[in-house]
Image: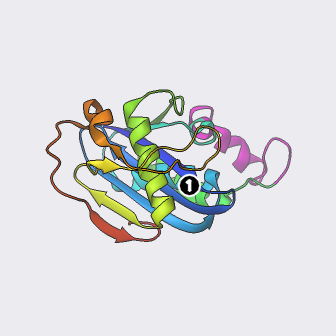
Amino acid sequence: MIVYTDGACSGNPGPGGWAWAVVDGGFASGADGHTTNQRMEITAAFEAVRANPGPLEIVSDSTYVVHCFRDRWHDGWRRRGWRNSQRQPVANRDLWEPFIELVLGRGDVTFRWVKGHGGDPMNDLVDRLAVAAATTQRGERGERPPSRLGPPDTFGTGESARGIVDAADIDDAIGPDDVDGPPEPSGQGSLF
């Protein structure tokens, strides 16, 4: 199964959101009132792994998330007592420790990087879901992504442009237009 993930933050720190979506499948998003973009990127991937059993490929535009696993940064962090290569404490250890434990325990999760804002329809979808969660401070989940989404981050700023974008732009990534109604709202924070 291929799962795309993304995080968004208005300000850094500031209100943030995270999202994941399965190609031709379900999705989830959540929010945090005061967070950082890195924390939302980690949370998006962590929640995707928690929610989706079986072999997974996590696709993220976060080199921070992808390199941790692909390049096994976590081995050095643990060997150095949760210090990075500059001997500073690893940022976001409270998220990394359980996430790394889960991924290594499962043994069936791989990671792939995708260029953010590079035209990948699924990356654009999770970006819009994360921005919506950050903006509304509400998470959602469902069997199919919503048919209407707000815009993605304005490139390089972490801030959302204003307006609503029709999901037809990403129809090829999520399937036919006949979305099965709106997803169930799930409130703030983690969905699981």
Above or below, 175 against 153 in this view is above
Residue furthest front as drawn: 163
Name the kind of residue labelled 1 in the image. Met
Instruction: Tell me, yes or no, if residue 28 can be seen here.
Output: yes
Given residues 80 and 62, the one toward you in this image is: 62
Which residue does the image show at 63% across and 41% down from the upper left?
A: 64
Residue furthest bottom as drawn: 187
Residue 104, percent from left and from top: 50, 46
Which residue does the image show at 72% across and 55% down from the upper left?
A: 91
Q: Does residue 61 appear left or right of residue 168 in this picture? A: right
Q: Which residue is mark 1?
A: 40
Give the colouring mode of the picture.
rainbow
Residue furthest right as drawn: 87
For label 1, the SS is: helix
Name the image quarter holding residue 39: bottom right
Given residues 15 and 186, the one toward you in this image is: 15
Above or below, 183 against 125 in this view is below
Badge 1, how many Cα within 10 Å: few under 14, some, many 20+? many
Given residues 162 and 43, the one toward you in this image is: 162
Q: Does residue 183 appear left or right of residue 107 in this picture? A: left
Image quarter hosting the C terminus: bottom left
86 part of magenta stretch: yes
Q: Which residues are magenta?
A: 67-88
Instruction: Tell me, yes or no, if residue 102 can be seen here.
Output: no
Q: Does residue 90 appear left or right of residue 111 in this picture? A: right
* Total numbered labels placed on residues in the image: 1
Name the image quarter holding residue 123: top left
Residue 118, percent from left and from top: 50, 27
97 part of magenta stretch: no
